[in-house]
Amino acid sequence: MHALEPGAVGAAWRALAQALPRPRAILVVSAHWDSDRPALTGVAHPQTIYDFYGFPDPLYHLRYPAPGSADLAGRARSLLAGAGIAAAIDDRRGLDHGAWSILLHMFPSADIPVVQLSLQTALGPRHHYQLGAALAPLAAEGVLLIGSGQMTHNLREWGRSLDDSAAPYVIEFQAWVHDRIMARDHDAVIAYVRSAPHAVRAHPSDEHFMPLFFTLGAAGPGALPLRTYDAVEGSVLAMDVYTFTPA
């Protein structure tokens, strides 16, 4: 629904995009595309995918007609191969809502080429960190690397609080991750299931947390982290926004 009702986090996405140098292209990882091995969109004109149901009709009329980039997909595939990671090019898939609902606010003109990379959630945090590290050279080539997930994502508890206040366990998990990101302790974040408070409750399934590890890997341990937004919605959905600037 942020696509229709962006609220405060939508304003944060817009402000972030305005503060960044204009990228020549965007590579985005979303929580909503999972595959057995890495895949990259290679279609020239990615469709807007409505991978959800039961929402208001206007949501299904939104479009994000950004061009794709076969060149960027090929370059990313080559970088992954250089790191020993085999990736496929999918020349039919479009952009799912984890990608376009954010880009709609960050770059509303939809005139910057976008390529999406799939997750392999079952392979865990270290794998996604390695994906990001392999694709890190793209940042120096003018490509904006985005991980689109959520700091906490327990939909079973969504809306249970009568006053919409942030659940204590969400605040504790959010603070733990923030402290370790700011300390550049990437290994600790990667081991969050064993170490973070309420890790399983914050993420009953892991797909919405995996994009963070992609961005950490792309940034590298020397990058400057900055949290630009940290509100909680519906008591249990932490909407943190981070940037990582290479040293």
Image (spheres, rainbow, N blue to C red):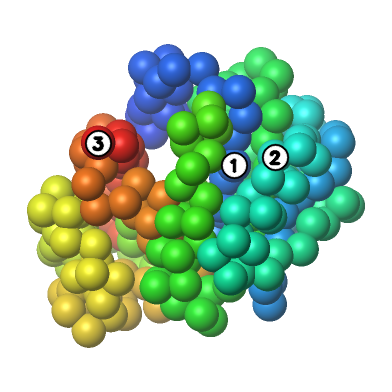
The answer to which quarter of the image holds residue 72 is top right
Which label belongs to residue 72? 2
Q: Nearer the viewer, mark 3 or mark 1?
A: 3
Labels in figure, total: 3
Horizontally, is 129 left or right of 5 in the view?
A: left
Q: Secondary structure at mark 1?
A: strand
Mark nearer the N terminus (2 vs 1) = 1
Q: Secondary structure at mark 2?
A: helix
Position in image of residue 170 (x %, y %): 22, 62
Foreground pick, 151 / 162: 151
Look at 40% across and 73% down and name the residue there: 126
Q: Which amino acid, by three-letter code, is at mark 3?
A: Ala
Which label belongs to residue 247? 3
Residue at mark 1? 27
Distance in Å between CA atoms under marks 2 and 3: 24 Å
Q: Which amino acid, by three-letter code, is at mark 1?
A: Leu
Foreground pick, 169 / 84: 84
Horizontally, is 201 left or right of 47 in the view?
A: left
Asked if marks 2 and 1 touch (Cβ < 8 Å), the reply is yes
Q: Residues within 10 Å of mark 3 (few under 14, many from 20)?
A: few
Q: Residues within 10 Å of mark 1 (few under 14, many from 20)?
A: many
| Residue 232 in view (yes/no) | yes
Q: Secondary structure at mark 3?
A: loop
Position in image of residue 149 (x %, y %): 46, 54
The answer to which quarter of the image holds residue 18 is top left
Mark nearer the N terminus (3 vs 1) = 1
Q: Residues within 10 Å of mark 2 (few under 14, many from 20)?
A: many
Look at 17% across and 54% down and name the residue there: 184
Outermost residue, front side: 82
Foreground pick, 133 / 227: 133
Horizontally, is 63 left or right of 188 in the view?
A: right
Distance in Å between CA atoms under marks 3 and 1: 20 Å
